[in-house]
Image (cartoon, rainbow, N blue to C red):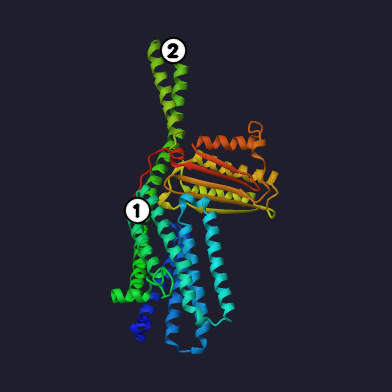
Amino acid sequence: MVRFNILMNLQQTVVLYFVYGLAFFSMGMLSMFQYVNHRDFLFRKSLFYLAIFGLTHGSAEWLIMFNRLNLEPTLQPILSIVILVLYGSSFYFLDFFALHLFKEYRFHQRKIQIIVNMVFIFWLSSIGFVLMQNDFRIMDVREGLILFTRYLTALPSGILTTISLLIYQRQLRKAQILTIANLLTLLAWIFLLYSISTGLIGEYFDFFPARFINRDAFIQTTHIPIEVFRILFAIGISIILFLVILIYEALKSKQERFILQKQVSINERRRMGSQLHDIVLQQLFAAKLNLDQLDEDVKNQPTIDVVRENLQTSMQNIRDFLKSPVIRRVNMDDIKQEIELLIFEESTPNLKIHFEYDVPVMLSRPIDSQAMNNIVYIIREFILNTKKYAQANRVDIDLIGNYEGLWLRLADNGGGFDMDAVDFTAHFGLNSIRNRVELCQGKMKWDTHDKTQCDLFFPWKGIIYDTPVTP
């Protein structure tokens, strides 16, 4: 069989690997820039790992290009080991990009993460074992180790990324963010094609499937190096990511204008409510007092009773308006600030409180201030119980938003307790937490085995009072 390196000259190889590496390195730089400068991006945490993947993978491809030039033959073995480690590690970061996209299953990622870590450790240990068995003469086993890396890291990572992108775009469709959802769907299929091209089509080896599906067979069938397709897929991934960022910024600006308009409307209603309370209501009350004083001097008593009743009705209507949810609505930023203030007040040298907030503007809604008070109270009560009963030195607070509502996880690293032994009617704190969750139409789940963890979900319909409008 004619080998690939014979069919393509050195200059073509250098150009291909340079463009290939540049595409992924550019994607990594773009992702890192977005991660650092835009703290409200839809999947910002995932973006960090995508940036590391792009930078690591691009660097590995450039090192492959340098290695092919063979400018320093003595460095080739060491460089080959570095390339192998960078190449496999890049897909480990891609796994974490996929994991953090599972927003619907954000609190159930640990099992998949354990599997990913185990696979990575197994791959790294296997590479080290084979190298030691061959006295680190990597040139004797390089092709086999590269193929092993493709099968164990590249292919599964690409498939996992495809699945996570398809699940995540489904969430965006439910939130009516259709343009970005369509782009992420296309990105998912490109990642699948890329994972097949880089994870399945590799070096020739005399075993299935490498015997039939390999780089040499591909170039004989298509007369095009597989690297060309990988470059196209890499460029496609970078372009789609750029479009996602561009469109997101436009949609975010539109949503911010909408929120600003709603806030202006709320402030105007609050101003009007203040005037009604301070001026009109007081004037109506004074008019009613005057009527009471004139009661004995007025001969037409039925008329004065009607006027008094009308005044009383007007005063009650104003009071009802002042109590309305519209007057008492707040934004998610207010909740974040209240929780941060609470953490500042309750943190001690013996108890560290870690707060993670992930509610993008695109998915957030204005909520009622009473709902905010309920959520903050629940967090406060959990912290107080941790201080009183749990021998813990850390509390984790995660507030995550999606198209359905708010997910709140409260956890400490204490010893836990027996939930079945707790009398909720006698335990005011826990009973109050449950009642406040019910007021917000929420759900609550406790896990008190060797720790104390409370997972809560508040649907938007339970904490807002008007129909949400999405851009």
Q: Is residue 64 left or right of residue 217?
A: right
Q: Label 2's element? A: loop
* Residue 338 in picture, x, y percent from top left: 55, 47
Q: Amino acid at mark 2?
A: Asp
210 up-or-down from 187: above or below: below
Q: Label 1's element? A: helix
Q: Residues within 10 Å of mark 1 (few under 14, many from 20)?
A: some
Closer to the camera in the image, 178 or 382: 178
Give the mark nearer the N terminus: 2 vs 1: 1
* Residue 361 in picture, x, y percent from top left: 42, 52
The residue positioned 41% from the left and 47% from the top of the image is 403
Q: Amino acid at mark 1?
A: Lys
Image quarter of residue 465 = top left
Front position among marks 2 and 1: 1
Residue at the disc numbered 1: 254
Residue at the disc numbered 2: 297
Q: Quadrant of the N terminus?
A: bottom left
Q: Is residue 325 left or right of residue 132?
A: left
- Label of residue 14 in the image: none
118 up-or-down from 364: above or below: below
